[in-house]
Image (tube, grey):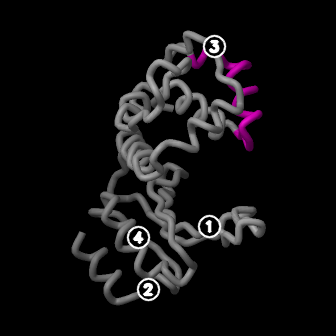
Amino acid sequence: MELKKLMEHISIIPDYRQAWKVEHKLSDILLLTICAVISGAEGWEDIEDFGETHLDFLKQYGDFENGIPVHDTIARVVSCISPSKFHECFINWMRDCHTSDDKDVIAIDGKTLRHSYDKSRRKGAIHVISAFSTMHSLVIGQIRTDEKSNEITAIPELLNMLDIKGKIITTDAMGCQKDIAEKIQKQ
């Protein structure tokens, strides 16, 4: 993992917390969260546990002056960051870390995220369109859609985020639209 590059990209995410109340840097919390999730953490307590176990490793890239924040702090801070800024940060980090050559195959597909619905709040499941680099076995771009049927409008937005020149692009039947094919060809 190119964590030094990640720390550079994290700096674009604004911290809206009141400065005099901050015990843990936003960059430290985001570094901890990203590393923990990549390592398989599935909840806030898992993220805290990961931090406690890997504090020496994390200190190589962040300050962690006050140690690892508790899971409630991690959850509160992460829930307050701008999703669009985080998305921009993550995409730019992936772009910096994983340049691919013309032989790369980019697979574009829509998925519904398991357990993302919330019946009590009447929120449906989350649908995303992802671009997967087969060369790196890595998602290099992703965009959320309101419904599965909106893949057709979301794919062009996703393509705008990616450097696809010279790449082979694959998609399922939903993405086989004349406008999408023309956009891929032009890029």
Q: Give the foreground label among 1 and 2.
A: 1
Queried whether the magenta region covers residue 166, the answer comes back as no
- Mark 3 or mark 1: whose residue is earlier in sequence: 3
Circle 1 SS class: loop
Q: Quadrant of residue 59?
A: top right
Q: Give the foreground label among 1 and 4.
A: 1
Q: Residue at the spot x=37%, y=50% of the render?
A: 100
Label 4 crowding class (10 Å Cα cut-off): few <14, some 14-19, many 20+?
Answer: some
- Residue type at mark 4: give it: Ile
Look at the image and give the residue range highlighted in magenta.
40-58
The residue that label 1 is drawn on is 126
Q: Quadrant of the C terminus?
A: bottom left
The residue that label 3 is drawn on is 67
- Residue type at mark 1: give it: Ile
Q: Residue at the spot x=45%, y=30% of the render?
A: 2
The residue that label 4 is drawn on is 169
Q: Give the foreground label among 3 and 4.
A: 3
| Front residue of 73 and 175 | 73
- Mark 1 or mark 2: whose residue is earlier in sequence: 1
- Return the mark for residue 176: 2
